């Protein structure tokens, strides 16, 4: 993926700095040469020995030593991309104001390579007007930002400020390095795929025959056109698409939460076969047969509709695409479904044959302009054609 690319990884002070080691490993595994720069704060959380071991390169942590070795200007000119992970509130402030009082800030001021920052800090610091203003300034200068996530922090506090996971940062680096000419460069797409599993008890669940082939292919096709893709997938055996942030979930409710957490996005493609119902009362222990007793009756409860929720969300993506799995009156049901769910397009398919789990699909694309019947083709081709149509729509 990154063959021959040079990446400068700047690590500043945060309890989450340990994740930078995993990020360095993933970048190297993807073919990049990783040069690490540690700030004084960063060096309190990860050792230069661990970083040198993982990157296979000398670690830079001293402005004056760097001068003697290769010079900060050369270090700034060397990389194809600079990734600051974790980016502390302090380093973001120094970047925003053009300070150059240590090696990391000096290199960040001198570089002309694209820069990605992955902020990590306490929620109060993240929400402070000073940090908001610094981020806005950096964004306006073209600095890319990934995260932070929301969730439990090291401190007994929760909220925005948590460093994004290494896989997510990796996907953002892929998008950062995507040739600017790609039609979906700079766009974020959320894609759902696969079935959901709705538990009955700790060992049993209700599922469906979705393989995730179509949804995974769409995620890969959007990424190939330069989009940053968050793929929210139910349990499948598909290989992970390259350059995509994969969020694994089991239930419909988890899938909805992951989709909402991934917003804002420009594009949503909801290809998952979400279970319409879940078991109302999941048993905490395995249900046991009682001698002579009747078989249990499962009471079902309605699941949230993810497509309809995203279509009516305050942060609604510009283009929302749903799927319709039908076994009869395919187009008519799809036209109704488009209106009912509030999405822009519906990709309708007849699932009465071998579509679920199969490799090919004949679909109808329902838009506000009418219905297009696409010929039967491999799911990978359906994905490529859909991604192309999406790129044209957003152009
Ligand atoms: N969908 C969803 N959340 C649900 C159910 C469905 O997001 N709880 C999405 C699917 O991902 C798909 C679209 O809605 O994009 C249509 O799914 P489908 O199963 O065809 O429709 P249903 O909503 O189940 O409607 P019906 O039962 O009338 O077929």
Image (cartoon, rainbow, N blue to C red):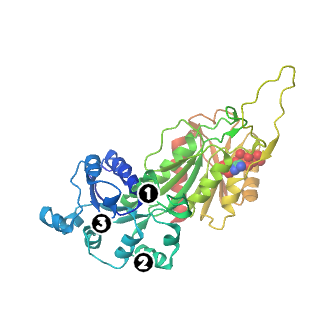
Q: Nearer the viewer, mark 1 or mark 2?
A: 2
SS at circle 2: helix
SS at circle 3: loop
Q: Is residue 328 visible?
A: yes
Q: Nearer the viewer, mark 1 or mark 3?
A: 3
Q: Residues within 10 Å of mark 3 (few under 14, many from 20)?
A: some
SS at circle 1: loop
x then y, percent, for residue 386: 55, 52
Q: Residues within 10 Å of mark 1 (few under 14, many from 20)?
A: many
Residue hosting label 3: 113
The circle drawn on residue 226 is 1
**Residue in the foreground of this view, choosing between 302 and 344:** 302
Q: Residue at x 79, y 24 (%)?
A: 289
x then y, percent, for residue 362: 62, 41
Q: Is residue 4 left or right of residue 145?
A: left
x then y, percent, for residue 325: 69, 43
Image quadrant in which you'd find residue 94: bottom left
**Residue in the foreground of this view, choosing between 129 and 390:** 129
**Residue in the foreground of this view, choosing between 374 and 177:** 177
Q: Residues within 10 Å of mark 2 (few under 14, many from 20)?
A: some
Does 218 appear above or below 37?
above
Q: Earlier in the sequence, mark 1 or mark 2?
A: 2
**Residue in the foreground of this view, choosing between 261 and 223:** 261
Does 368 appear above or below 383?
below
Separation of residues labelled 1 and 3 (CA atoms): 18 Å
Q: Earlier in the sequence, mark 3 or mark 2?
A: 3
The circle drawn on residue 24 is none
Residue hosting label 2: 137
Q: Is residue 10 visible?
A: no
């Amino acid at each position: 993926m990154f063959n021959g690319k040079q990446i400068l990884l700047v690590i500043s002070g945060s309890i989450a700095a340990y994740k930078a080691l995993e990020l360095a490993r993933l970048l190297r595994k993807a073919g990049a040469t990783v040069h690490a720069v540690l700030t004084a704060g960063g060096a309190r959380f990860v050792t230069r020995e661990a970083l040198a071991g993982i990157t296979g390169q000398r670690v830079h942590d001293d402005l004056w030593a760097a001068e003697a070795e290769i010079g900060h200007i050369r270090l700034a000119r060397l990389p194809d991309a600079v990734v600051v992970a974790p980016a502390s509130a302090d380093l973001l402030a120094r970047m925003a104001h053009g300070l150059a009082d240590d090696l990391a800030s000096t290199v960040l001021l001198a570089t002309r390579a694209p820069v990605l920052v992955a902020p990590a800090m306490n929620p109060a610091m993240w929400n402070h007007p000073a940090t908001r203003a610094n981020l806005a300034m950096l964004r306006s200068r073209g600095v890319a930002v990934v995260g932070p996530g929301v969730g439990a922090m090291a401190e007994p506090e929760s909220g925005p400020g948590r460093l994004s996971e290494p896989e997510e940062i990796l996907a953002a680096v892929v998008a950062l390095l995507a040739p600017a000419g790609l039609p979906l460069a700079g766009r974020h797409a959320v894609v759902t795929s696969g079935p959901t599993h709705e538990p009955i008890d700790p060992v049993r669940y209700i599922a469906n025959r979705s393989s995730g082939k179509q949804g995974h292919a769409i995620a890969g096709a959007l990424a190939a056109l330069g989009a940053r893709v968050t793929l929210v997938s139910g349990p499948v055996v598909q290989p992970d698409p390259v350059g995509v942030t994969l969020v694994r979930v089991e239930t419909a409710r988890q899938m909805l939460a992951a989709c909402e957490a991934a917003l804002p996005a420009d594009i949503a493609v909801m290809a998952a076969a979400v279970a319409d119902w879940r078991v109302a009362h999941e048993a905490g222990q395995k249900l046991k047969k009682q001698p002579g007793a009747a078989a249990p009756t499962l009471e079902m409860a309605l699941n949230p509709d993810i497509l309809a929720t995203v279509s009516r969300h305050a942060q609604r993506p510009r283009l929302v695409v749903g799927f319709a799995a039908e076994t009869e009156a395919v187009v008519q049901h799809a036209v109704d479904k488009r209106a009912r769910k509030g999405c822009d397009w519906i990709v309708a398919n007849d699932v009465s044959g071998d579509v679920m789990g199969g490799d090919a699909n004949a679909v109808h694309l329902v838009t506000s302009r009418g219905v297009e019947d696409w010929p039967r083709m491999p799911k990978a081709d359906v994905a490529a054609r859909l991604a192309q149509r999406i790129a044209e729509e957003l152009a």
